[in-house]
Amino acid sequence: MKFICVTLLIISGITDSRSEQYKVVGPTDPVFAAAGEDVILPCSVKPNISVVDMRVEWFRPDLKDSQVHLYDDHVDKYTDQIQSYRGRTELNNQELQRGNASLKLSSVRVSDEGRYKCFIQSKYQYDDTTVNVSVEGE
């Protein structure tokens, strides 16, 4: 009996991890933004499964203090966010249910230009994509 219970637990664990497999995707071309405007940095999972229970982190790999936005344990966390992004980033919680983790960046600045990583981690896997942002103006 003990063997059957252990076997069922292992099989259910394998099934759960397989059902959660996804790929993080973003744009292949740079995202263009005008200084002072708002911009959406696209990022989603395929297939379109909810990422509400996952960790979603946006960061700048080229910067020392790199965190742009963190969503973890069902809440946005700003403790380690780069100071210049405070109050300017937002994820749409309803869209997270559809697998869309796109980041809204408000009042774009020239200093926002560069590479961004969208990192999504579930209990069983993680993946990321890179979004290149080009800022025009001022």
Image: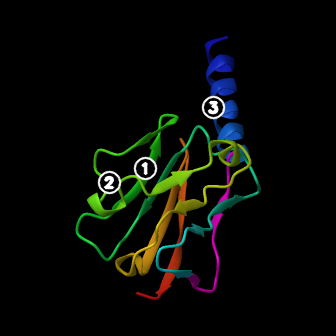
Q: Residues within 10 Å of mark 1 (few under 14, many from 20)?
A: many
Please state the horizontal and vertical placement of residue 112, each as a whole percent of the image: 40, 75
- Amino acid residing under circle 3: Ile
103 on left or right of 68 = right
**Label 1–label 3 contact, CB within 8 A:** no
**Label 2–label 1 contact, CB within 8 A:** yes
Instruction: Examine the rendered structure and indicate whether residue 89 appears above or below residue 124.
Output: below
- Amino acid residing under circle 2: Gln
Q: How is the image coloured?
A: rainbow
- The segment highlighted magenta reads 20-32
**Mark 3, residue position:** 10
Residue drawn at x 64%, y 43% as measured from the top left: 17
Instruction: Give the numbered dot on residue 70.
Output: 1
- Tell me the element at label 2: loop
**Mark 2, residue position:** 81
Residue drawn at x 67%, y 52% as measured from the top left: 21
117 on left or right of 45 = left
- Amino acid residing under circle 1: Leu
Residue 26 belongs to magenta span: yes
Instruction: Examine the rendered structure and indicate whether residue 40 appears above or below residue 48.
Output: below
Residue drawn at x 52%, y 74% as measured from the top left: 130
Please state the horizontal and vertical placement of residue 43, each as a whole percent of the image: 62, 64
> Nearer the N terminus, badge 2 or badge 3?
3
C-alpha span from label 2 to label 1: 8 Å
Q: Quadrant of residue 10?
A: top right
Task: Spot the residue most to the top.
Answer: 1
Q: Residues within 10 Å of mark 3 (few under 14, many from 20)?
A: few
- Tell me the element at label 3: helix
73 on left or right of 77 = right
Q: Nearer the viewer, mark 2 or mark 3?
A: 2
